Image: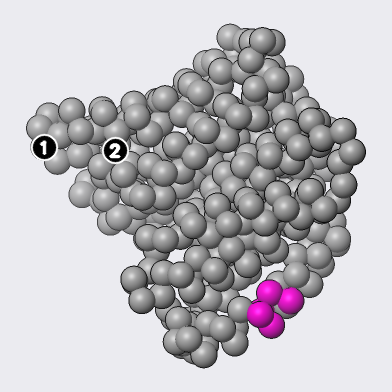
Amino acid sequence: MEKKNIFSWVVLFGLSITSSIIVMIITDQNSLFQKISLVISMIFITSTILLLLLPDINRGFLELIKKKLNYYLFVSCILLIPLINWFFIPDFSSKLKEILGSYVLWYIIPALIMMGPTFHTKLKPWGPLFHIVGVIILAIGFDNRTTDPIMSGFIDLSYSFNALWVSGLCLAIITIQYDDYSEFFNWNIHLKKIGFPIGILFSFAIIVLPIGLLSGFIVWNPNWEGVGVFLITFLGIWFMIALPEEVIARGIIQHQMLKVAKENISKYRKGYTIIIILLASFIFGISHWNNTSAEFVWIYIGLATVAGIGFGVCWEKHGLFSSMLMHTLIDFTWVMCFSA
């Protein structure tokens, strides 16, 4: 086994075990069986995500799921994971209709829409449209917390479980549909992928901090409570916020809009890339309409749109790792140094 492969496997097992330990520490489930079920589910989802994103070890796995039966079994297994927490939902029988309806509307239907073009050549030219429509439906349910009842059996970590699960589902569906998946989604780290988002971050800070502070939207309020809190906060933002939002907003919506433009505009210019990044960033900004009070809603949408432009440029230059790094650093700085 090559050294790169060994390193990737070490990262996979290390992060999966770390996430399980963090879950065990911070969660407050009603029973040990409930806690164990949550930890096992989180390990499975985390390992699946890392298997799809870590370079050197995902090649063989991607080849494996290129077979139609393997692909459908793989995606179906991920789709069924939320059913585990249904055993722990209080008064589940009385809520069955609501839970099942939400599950079908916000998860099953968008997943089927996104899976549609996978092995059907007649649908493949329409693949980007299927992906964008499907993921927007998925994001509406997830972002508006419409899907909260579906995950309520895991009490205090229902959102975290949902965020990881949505990320894993989206990645599982699109992996073999994107010819350039390895180019954009692999977490193969090098200095440019780290330095570029940090540079964009400082540019972003020059614009955003004065607006946020002068408007009263953000307030200096440092919250530094030791290395443990730093690690948990950083990993939490990386996996629960940056990963699902970047996979959806940049990995699918922006990426597929750019794909359509490049394939259908005969004389494609760089200016079109800028327009699409701006459009995708505005969609990303609008999705934050319910994340703050009415007083600051348009300020938040505006700042999120500006941040989205930075994330979009990072994606276009260096893919998912860079856009996630910038996203995580912004949210981490916000949580650690400011309050809104």
Where does the image place residue 286, in percent across and percent down from the top left? Answer: 49, 57
Q: Secondary structure at mark 1?
A: loop
Q: Amino acid at mark 1?
A: Asp
User: Which residue is labeled 2 in the image?
Assistant: 150
Where is residue 143? Give x, y as percent. Answer: 41, 50
Looking at the image, is mark 1 or mark 2 nearer the viewer?
A: 2
Q: CA distance from mark 1 to mark 2?
A: 13 Å
Answer above or below: position of 68 versus 196.
Answer: above
Q: Quadrant of the N terminus?
A: top right
Above or below, comparing residue 313 to residue 30 in the picture:
below
Q: Disc 2 marks which amino acid?
A: Ile
Asked if the stretch drawn in magenta spans residue 205, the answer is yes
When the figure is inspected, residue 276 is found, relative to residue 89, above or below; the finding is below
Depth order, front residue of 326/212 = 212
Q: Which residue is at a point 54% across and 48% down the rendered structure image?
A: 244
Tell me the tag on residue 91: 1
- Mostly what secondary structure, the magenta segment? helix
What residue sits 47% from the left and 54% below the top?
287
Give the SS element for disc 2: helix
Q: Tag 1: Cα neighbours inside 10 Å, few (<14), some, or many (≥20)?
A: few
User: At 26% across and 28% down in the image, what residue appears?
Assistant: 101
Q: Which class describes the residues within 10 Å of circle 2: few (<14), some (14-19), or many (20+)?
A: many
Residue nearest the observer in this picture, 163 or 260: 260
What are the residue bounds of the magenta stretch? 203-207
Query: Earlier along the polypeptide chain: callout 1 or callout 2?
Result: 1
Which image quadrant is residue 234 in? bottom right
